[in-house]
Image (tube, rainbow, N blue to C red):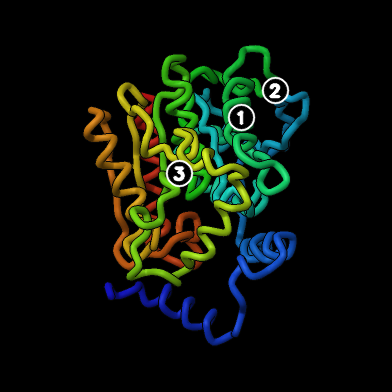
Amino acid sequence: MTRLDPIAQQMIDETRSSGQINAHLLPVADARLRFEAAFASLQKPELASVRDVTIPTRDNQAIRGRLYLPDGRTAPGLVLYFHGGGWLLGSIDSHDVTARKLAESSGCPVLSVDYRRGPESPFPTAVNDALDALAWASSPENPLTIENNNRVVVAGDSAGGNLAAAVANESRDEGTVIHQLLVYPVTTWDLDRGMDPEFDGIMLERDELQWHQDNYLAFEEDRSDRRVNVLSADLRGVPEATVILAECDPIRPQGELYVEALREAGVTLEVQQYTGMIHGFFGLDEVFPVAAEAMEFAGQRVSEAFR
């Protein structure tokens, strides 16, 4: 096995010795509480402004969003961020620090979207919420008062990366999305292709990944839908991309396959893989020193996209 980063190895060892059971063996509500608690103590960088907003949806409901303004400068555009958690866990609260750090490193406003999750709101609700957030955030009538809000970078980690890729694909003809930042994204339902067995049990287990799918996808045919299985989509003409991968991530192959598909479609992209890193490291600067490097790289790529 490739050698894990020493800090990551210690984290894995402590988790295993604690006897803590995997999330997929818990009731969903309990798994959500544990996921949120894991991020609760992280230090939050101070920004010029952080405020919650309400985003309307196509089914006359509303979802939460959180807008992060790094400073008072004229905004070059807007970053739309979708959190990870397997379409089942996670929230704008669990990813508050990640969104703050991305706003800080890029110098750009970030709108984090609290899309609805399975199993209560199965596919395609999360994708529709993501698309509705894009339409609302880029509209001249919305109350965000962000300059150049019709120029958007979509970003996300893990399942949030899946949503970001889906939004970039589905909205390509509109020209609003100019870049996609995908952090160890989910790109296929096929775990035979999209999982490296060498790292099964390193932060993620195969059964856990299947659990996420089963709670998000209500029907078998949903698995092949291009808004889930983004790897199967026609990627010609999608916006340029940045892909961040972790070497010791069991779903790293999904990102690698997507990079290959983007290149075959003629999409301009840049890829950065972090040696010894595990799924979930992005934004955890307090834990992994290299996470700060990854965030700086992400911020640079976002700011460059707006030039």
The answer to whether the residue labelled 2 contacts the one labelled 1, judged by CB atoms less than 8 Å apart, is yes
Q: Is residue 264 visible?
A: yes
Residue at label 2?
Answer: 58
In this view, the residue in front, 273 or 266, is 266
Q: Is residue 103 visible?
A: no
Looking at the rendered image, the disc whose residue lies closer to the viewer, 3 or 2, is 2
Q: Quadrant of the C terminus?
A: top left
Per the model, the C-alpha gap separating discs 3 and 1 is 29 Å
**How many numbered marks does the figure carry?**
3
Which of the labelled discs sits on residue 128, or is there none?
A: 1
In this view, the residue in front, 132 or 112, is 132
> Where in the figure is residue 267, as x and y percent of width and height?
27, 29
> Where in the figure is residue 81, as x and y percent of width and height?
54, 38
Per the model, the C-alpha gap separating discs 3 and 2 is 33 Å
Compare marks 3 and 1 and give the one earlier in the sequence: 3
Q: Write the residue at 72% across / 32% down.
A: 53
Which of the labelled discs sits on residue 105, or is there none?
A: 3
> Where in the figure is residue 117, as x and y percent of width and height?
66, 45
Q: Write the residue at 58% across / 45% down.
A: 217
Compare marks 3 and 2 and give the one earlier in the sequence: 2
Q: What amino acid is found at the position of numbered circle 3 in the picture? A: Ser
Q: Quadrant of residue 49?
A: top right
Query: Under tag 2, what secondary structure?
Result: loop
Per the model, the C-alpha gap separating discs 2 and 1 is 8 Å
Compare marks 2 and 1 and give the one earlier in the sequence: 2
> Where in the figure is residue 305, as x and y percent of width and height?
37, 29
Does 99 sit left or right of 67 as displayed? left
Q: Write the residue at 35% across / 48% down.
A: 255
Q: What amino acid is found at the position of numbered circle 1 in the picture? A: Asn
The answer to whether the residue labelled 3 contacts the one labelled 2, judged by CB atoms less than 8 Å apart, is no
Q: Write the residue at 41% across / 34% down.
A: 180
Q: Is residue 168 above or below residue 213?
A: above
